[in-house]
Amino acid sequence: MTTRLFVVLMTVLLCAFPGGLRAEALKTAVFAGGCFWCVESDFDRVPGVVKTISGYTGGTVANPTYRQVTAGGTGHYEAVEITYDPGQVSYAELLTAFWRSVDPTDPDGQFCDRGHSYKTAVFVADDTERRLAEATKQAAEDALGKPVATVVLDAGPFYPAEDYHQDFYEKSPVRYRYYRWSCGRNQRVEALWGEQAYRGIPQHK
């Protein structure tokens, strides 16, 4: 292939994919870990994660509101859709970070937040993700010596939450930090996981 032909081919490809060729390789993971403000804050700090979106998934109501979801009856979880570069961080590494940033032994919610919408779950897109999710779930159970209540579910429609929820930890840092501290999230995770707490999440806040 001549240099001229190569340049023409690359130009055509870049025009066809405005985000660049690398962007096509990005993948998504969806985790429910209690309050999505906190999950979003944690995963934004993971190297290789390029975007996070707080939202709702797992239920039967289309385009639900926060009030509907937290009131119950929709079947939805508060969840975060994580867009990541698999060249920098693997799905297995994201799962490790997830398990060690929640209390997976709690069947009724997370920390001070109770009810179905605050339960933990991993939403998988295919058999490979399911195998990894189930394997790391078993590893978490073995490490803790306790049953893990987190469920592994097939991924379905994901509905972004209201704008004010997105990047809440940056928009309202004082309120966010007070909520996280008063809810006891860090304290419980650190008590449960010890030195493994927040593994893979630098400078969690």
Image (cartoon, grey):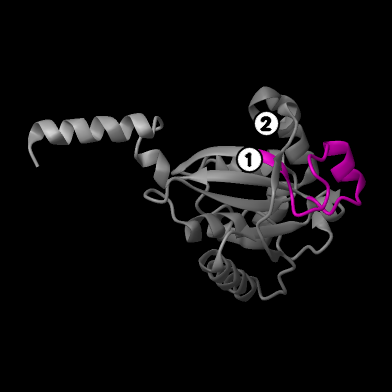
Residue located farthest toward the top when viewing the structure as drawn: 171
Tell me the quarter of the picture where residue 167 sits. Answer: top right
Expressed as whole percent of the image width and height from the top left, the position of residue 41 reads: 62, 38
The residue lying toward the viewer, choosing from 24 and 151, is 24
First in residue order: circle 2 vs circle 1: 1
Position above or below: 127 against 103: below
**Residue ID at (36%, 40%):** 22
Q: Which residue is mark 1?
A: 40
> Which range is magenta?
54-76
User: Element under label 1?
Assistant: helix
User: Element under label 2?
Assistant: loop
**Residue ID at (81%, 64%):** 107
Q: Are marks 2 and 1 in contact (CB under 8 Å)?
A: yes
Position above or below: 129 against 35: below
Tell me the quadrant of the picture where the C terminus can be found.
top right
The residue lying toward the viewer, choosing from 6 and 25, is 6
Expressed as whole percent of the image width and height from the top left, the position of residue 199 reads: 53, 55
Expressed as whole percent of the image width and height from the top left, the position of residue 118 reads: 79, 51
Q: Mark 2 or 1, which is nearer the eye?
A: 2
Q: Which residue is mark 2?
A: 166
